[in-house]
Image (cartoon, rainbow, N blue to C red):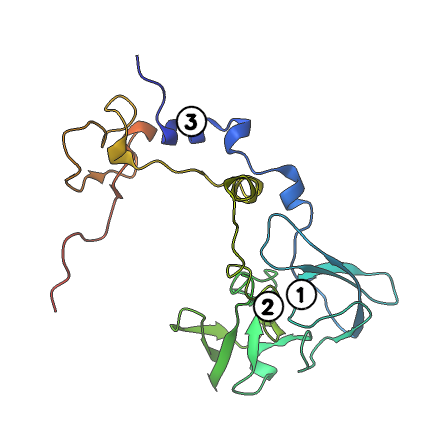
Amino acid sequence: MGKRIIQQRRGHGSLTYRVRKKAGLVRPGYLTKLEGEFKVIKLISSPGHSVPIAKIANKEGKIFYNFAANLLYVGQKITIGGSSVGDIAKVGDLKNGTTVFNIENHQLDGGKFIRAGGASGTIMNTEGDKVTILMPSKKVKKFNKNCRATVGRAAGHGRVEKPILKAGRKFYIMKAKSKLWPRTSAVAMNKIDHPFGSGRGKRVKSKIAKRNAAPGKKVGHLRPRRTGRKKR
């Protein structure tokens, strides 16, 4: 009798495939109402994020957490509506060529885009109530001019350049974010462990699974819009 395949085990929600509670204790994002001047009181290293997190407060005691900009330091003043590195402002108020990160997708959602270590986008131009931003993927995306963002580049650049050196360190890095590691190729498994398994060769034909298929059947393409080679 075969064991459950990986998709079924992950869907069951056991501790093996659950993100550690420690990784999500701090939730970065913007407060609904932000105005005036704040101060960075602490920098936190979160295992669930690739960017250091800054604890920011004002004189009235309002506290929120945001991803730290590159070269941000404890004691630095953060101006809401400013244009210096680390400041938080609406993208419509910033000049063309300004680098930003942690951009809101919709107003007051706290930030959804460009939140990885060392990442940043560039403001291209403003047309009406839409601001065009060049994303790290080199694609262009339009945002509402009232969406907020942090000025500068996210800290943590170069984190992938440092060699991991040993498997044990890699194991704990992946475990903190509940990533499946080490990962075994499906075609290298036995037939009872995965639909792609068996030693009958590695020339597996692409399979298309329905969106409402059972967990054990969700392998290959999941309800793709199109398949095959794209013709010009």
- Residue beneath label 1, please? 68
In the image, what residue occupies the spot 86% across and 61% down? 61
Q: Earlier in the sequence, mark 3 or mark 1?
A: 3
How many other residues sit within 10 Å of disc 1, few (<14), some (14-19) or many (≥20)? many
Residue farthest along the left direction in this orientation: 231
Q: Nearer the viewer, residue 22 or 187?
A: 187
Q: Do the numbered discs 2 and 1 sit on residues whose CB atoms are within 8 Å?
A: yes
Mark pair 3, 1: CA separation: 36 Å
Element under label 2?
loop
Element under label 1?
loop
In the image, what residue occupies the spot 30% across and 12% down? 1
Mark pair 3, 2: CA separation: 35 Å
- Residue beneath label 3, please? 9
Residue type, numbered disc 3: Arg
Residue type, numbered disc 2: Ala
Residue type, numbered disc 1: Ala
In the image, what residue occupies the spot 38% across and 72% down? 139
Q: Position of residue 57 (x, y in %)?
A: 81, 63
Q: Nearer the viewer, residue 142 or 194?
A: 194
Is 135 displayed left or right of 75 in the figure? left
Q: Position of residue 27 (x, y in %)?
A: 66, 52
How many other residues sit within 10 Å of disc 3, few (<14), some (14-19) or many (≥20)? some
Q: Nearer the viewer, residue 144 or 89?
A: 89
- Residue beneath label 2, please? 154
Q: Position of residue 84 (x, y in %)?
A: 68, 81
